[in-house]
Amino acid sequence: MVTRTVDLRSDTVTKPTEAMRAAMATAEVDDDVLGYDPTVFRLETEMAKIMGKEAALFVPSGTMGNLISVLTHCDVRGSEVILGDNCHIFIYENGGISTIGGVHPRTVKNNSDGTMDLDLIEAAIRDPRGEIVYPTTRLICLENTHANSGGKCLSAEYTDQVGELAKKHDLKLHIDGARIFNSSVALGVPVDRLVRAADSVSVCLSKGIGAPIGSIIVGSKSFIAKARRLRKTLGGGMRQVGVIAAAALVALQENVGKLESDHKKARLLAGKYYHTNFNYFRIK
C-alpha cells in the first residue's frame, strides 16, 4: 500500500507543475523594469483581457498588489479608505497602507458572508464639506472571496451596489481578488462580470490557480501607469521576470479549469475532517 501525503495548510503551498517548469526554462525574457520583457507583457495583456480592464501590472505578491492599489488611489497622505474589519488588507498586511502610505483605514463590520452593509459603508464616508479635522475618504475596498468569512463569494450584484455607492460619492472601488477565479467558478459568473464595478483589482496567481510566484493588478491605463512607478518605489521591479510570468501563464491556461474539481474535493474534506493548528483529524 502506497501512502501519499497531501499538504492542506493552504493553496499557497503548491509546487510548479512539469509544464510550468518547462515554460520557465524556455521563457523569452528581457528587462521588465524597462518595460521590455515579452513574457510579462503577454501575461499582463491576457489578464487585462480576462478581467475586462484596460491594463495590468505584474507584482511579486498580493500584499504588494493591494498596497500599490490603495496608494495609487489614495495618493494624498492622510486619505481614508473604507474596508471591512475582518478583511485581509486590514488584518494581515502589516498595516502597510498606514505605515508606508499614510492612508487611514476606517473599518466597517464584515457580515458573516463577507459583505458590509451598504448603509454602514455610506455612513462611514466623510462629507468633503465637513470639518477639516477629518481625513478625506477616497476609496472603498472589498475582498472576493472573503477569506476570514470562510471563503464566501461576493455576488456581482452586491459589488455593483458598492460600485454605485462609490460613484455617488466620487470615490474609487478596489477589490482584493486574491481568489477571484475561485469565486467566479463557484458562482458560475464570468470573472470580468464580478469586477465590472471596480476601478482596480488585485489577483493572486500563487493561490487558487497554483503558480509559484506573483500577483497581477488590473485597472485603467492611467491607473497602471501610476502603479508601475509605485512598484519601482517599493522594490517590486524585477528584471527578467518572464521566467516566473511563464509559469503564471501556464496556470491560467491549465488550472482555472480545475477549480471546480478543487471545490468538490474541498467540500468533501470539509465534511470529513476537522482541523486546528494545521493538524488534521478525521471526524468519526
Image (cartoon, helix red, strand yellow):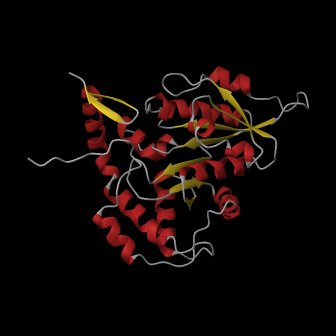
Q: In which quadrant of the rendered view does residue 59 lie?
A: bottom right
| Residue depicted at 54% across the width and 27% down the height | 115
Side of 209 relative to 234 (left or right): left
Work out whether residue 10 or residue 200 is closer to the camera in this orientation and state it.
10
Indicate the position of residue 17 as horizontal and vertical percent values.
Answer: 30, 61
At x 79%, y 29%, the residue is 126
Position above or below: 44 against 116? below
Report which quarter residue 249 is drawn in.
bottom left
Q: How many marks?
A: 0
Q: Single out the residue that lies furthest toward the right.
A: 132
x then y, percent, for residue 255: 33, 53
- Measuring 57% from the left and 29% from the top, which residue is drawn there? 86
In the depicted view, which residue is nearer to us: 59 or 180?
59
In the visual, does 192 lie left or right of 138? left
The answer to whether residue 15 is above or below residue 111 is below
Classify the position of the C terminus by image quarter: top left
Lateral position of residue 254 relative to residue 77, left or right: left
Q: Is residue 183 left or right of residue 266?
A: right
Question: What residue lies at 50% left-to-right and 69% top-to-bottom?
Answer: 40
The percent coordinates of residue 220 (x first, y second) are: 63, 55
Task: Provide residue 28's location: percent of width, then percent of height.
Answer: 44, 78
Picture layout, residue 225 above or below residue 123: below
On the image, which quarter does residue 61 sit in? bottom right
